[in-house]
Structure formats: structure tokens, C-alpha cells
Image: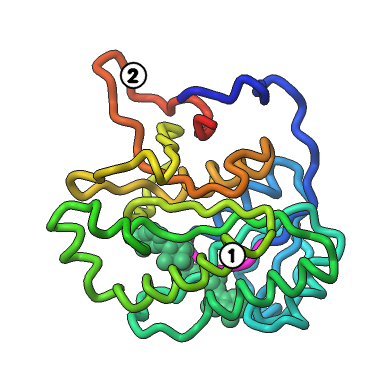
């Protein structure tokens, strides 16, 4: 994968004070562990701080991502926020992302912490019509949740925050491969077939976006880099988005 010319990967990474929303979820747990492992100073906002499965090495703040008060308190002193919030397999929208985006915008106005990398999904907004028939049918039950995400994202895009929206294709629990293709949403006219990408690759890409401050005020689509005949079996390069 190509790396940015302006952010060479041999430079030492700055330690980031990072807030994670959704750190107890399937992707959030991976992202949180990776951020801790890379030496970042990680705070997590969790609904139940007594859970036994919290990622060690983080500062745990108890609260609700839908609460302006809780989010504002958690944002204090933070350089960047990564959101991997989700509703699991629920297909009835509950306002989660609308409330969370509202709380993040309100919190940024008070704390000045305005960098937000938010995990969303291919299939949101008009991306669904760019998909294959199979994917359009598969995503049908989640359409109302995706519509609500689109509404929250519209508010984010006009908020003045330094946002990045991350649109992965279908998520799997597979290993990190490092073979991630990152493209601007505007450059993806069609998404053929029924592609997937591992949560581990998505989590690593989100960390790279934070560390290298990539894709500011843009929506980035993540899928698996197509294999070339010359590729070996080992993990590929770092999953740096191409811009
Ligand atoms: N499945 C796919 O193929 C796919 C594809 C592309 C994108 N996505 C999107 O990727 C995102 C992450 O998916 P995932 O499967 O990793 O998520 P997940 O396992 O469902 O985790 C969701 C996280 O959000 C937290 N959360 C929910 N409501 C909260 C609230 N009010 N306050 C604080 N935390 C709250 C949960 O906390 P608790 O532990 O307290 O519940 C959990 O940590 C989702 O938005 C999903 O739609 C999914």
C-alpha cells in the first residue's frame, strides 16, 4: 500500500492521548489494545467500568456515549477520539449515533478536542446503490440503522469538527493482514461482489489515520487490497491508507 509522501513511516510516532468510544465491542477492543501496545495514552468511556474484560492499560471512565455530560468529561485533554460505537446485531434504530455525534460536537465546543475518527459502514447513505445485488439484499435488514447513521454523519460533516469517517466493507474476525486498500468515498463508483475485511485490519488502519493525521474531513472506504500473483503468504505492509 502506498504511503503519504508527507508522512514517512520511519519517523517516530507521537504519543496521542486517545479517547475510545466502543472499546468493549468487537472492533473497539482490538483498536484499544493496539493503541495501548503502540504506547498511546488511552482513555475509554464504558457503560460498565466493573467488567472483567476491559483492555488492561487504559484509563477507564464510566459513562454513556449518548450523554453530553459524560462525553464532555471524557474529552478533557484528549488529542483524538476514535469511535467504534455500534448496536451489535440490532436492526431497530435507537438514536445511538445521533445522540453520540451530538454529544461529541457539544463536548468539542467546550473542551476544544475536535479530532474524531468514526467507524461507520459501507452501505450507509447512497453507497448501498453502488453495491452488488447480493450486498444490497444482505444489508436490507439493517437499512433503518444505516439511515440513522447517515443522519448522524450529515450532522458530523457540517459540524466544524476535524472528522474522518471510516467505511469498511463487511467485517470479519479474521487476522490482520496489513493488505488494506483505502480510497476516498468519492472515488468508489462501484463495490462489486461481497467483499469483507477483518476488524483487526480496520482497527490498525484507524490507528494509522490517527497517528499520521490522515483523511481529515473525508470519508475513507476500506477493503482488502487485491492480491497480486507475486504476493507471499505473510502479512503485507503496514495498513497505511494511501492518503
Ligand atoms: N458487522 C459488519 O459487517 C460491519 C461492517 C461495517 C461496519 N460495521 C460497523 O462497525 C461498528 C463497530 O462494529 P462492532 O461489531 O465492532 O461493534 P459491537 O461489537 O457491536 O460494539 C459496539 C460497542 O458500542 C458500545 N456502545 C453501544 N451503545 C453505547 C452507549 N450508549 N454508550 C457507550 N458505549 C456504547 C458497546 O458497549 P457495551 O459493551 O456497553 O454494549 C460496544 O463497546 C458498528 O457501528 C457497525 O455498524 C459493521
Residue 24 on the magenta span: yes
Q: Residues within 10 Å of mark 1 (few under 14, many from 20)?
A: many
The residue at the far front in this view is 158
* Image location (x, y in percent) of residue 57: 75, 57
Which residue is depicted at the point 36% across and 85% down? 92
Residue 201 on the magenta span: no
Sequence-first tag of 1 and 2: 1
Q: Which mark is residue 214?
A: none
For the residues labelled 1 and 2, say whether their Cβ atoms are less than 8 Å apart: no
Q: Secondary structure at mark 1?
A: helix
What range is drawn magenta here?
20-26
Quadrant assignment for the N terminus: top left
Q: CA distance from mark 1 to mark 2?
A: 40 Å
Q: Quadrant of residue 85?
A: bottom right
* Image location (x, y in percent) of residue 152: 52, 71
Does 100 sit above or below residue 23?
below
* Image location (x, y in percent) of residue 66: 63, 81
Q: Nearer the viewer's eye, disc 1 or disc 2? A: 1
Does 111 sit above or below residue 131?
below
Which residue is depicted at the point 45% across and 33% down? 178
Q: Is residue 71 left or right of residue 84?
A: right
Which residue is depicted at the point 54% across and 43% down? 204
Q: Secondary structure at mark 2?
A: loop
Quadrant assignment for the C terminus: top right
Please give the residue where the numbered disc 2 appears in the rendered image. Answer: 232
Looking at the image, can residue 32 be seen? no
Amino acid at each position: 500500500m502506498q504511503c503519504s509522501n508527507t508522512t514517512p513511516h520511519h519517523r517516530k510516532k507521537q504519543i496521542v492521548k486517545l479517547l475510545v468510544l466502543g472499546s468493549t465491542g468487537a472492533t473497539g477492543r482490538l483498536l484499544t489494545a493496539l493503541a495501548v501496545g503502540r504506547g498511546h495514552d488511552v482513555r475509554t468511556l464504558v457503560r460498565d467500568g466493573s467488567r472483567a474484560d476491559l483492555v488492561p492499560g487504559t484509563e477507564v471512565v464510566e459513562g454513556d456515549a449518548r450523554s453530553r455530560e459524560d462525553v464532555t468529561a471524557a474529552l478533557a485533554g484528549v488529542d483524538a477520539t476514535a469511535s467504534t460505537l455500534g448496536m451489535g446485531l440490532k436492526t431497530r434504530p435507537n438514536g445511538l449515533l445521533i445522540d453520540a455525534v451530538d454529544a461529541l460536537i457539544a463536548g468539542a465546543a467546550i473542551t476544544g478536542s475536535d479530532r474524531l475518527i468514526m467507524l461507520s459502514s459501507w452501505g450507509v447513505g447512497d453507497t448501498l446503490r453502488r453495491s452488488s445485488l447480493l450486498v444490497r439484499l444482505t444489508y436490507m435488514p439493517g437499512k433503518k440503522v444505516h439511515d440513522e447513521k447517515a443522519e448522524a454523519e450529515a450532522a458530523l460533516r457540517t459540524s466544524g469538527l476535524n472528522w474522518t469517517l471510516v467505511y469498511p466493507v463487511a467485517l470479519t474476525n479474521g487476522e490482520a493482514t496489513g493488505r488494506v486498500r483505502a480510497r476516498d468515498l468519492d472515488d468508489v463508483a462501484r463495490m462489486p461482489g461481497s467483499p469483507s475485511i477483518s476488524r483487526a485490519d480496520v482497527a490498525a488502519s484507524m490507528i494509522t489515520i490517527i497517528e499520521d493525521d490522515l483523511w481529515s474531513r473525508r470519508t475513507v472506504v476500506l477493503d482488502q487490497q487485491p492480491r497480486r500473483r507475486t504476493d507471499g503468504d505473510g502479512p503485507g505492509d503496514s495498513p497505511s491508507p494511501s492518503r
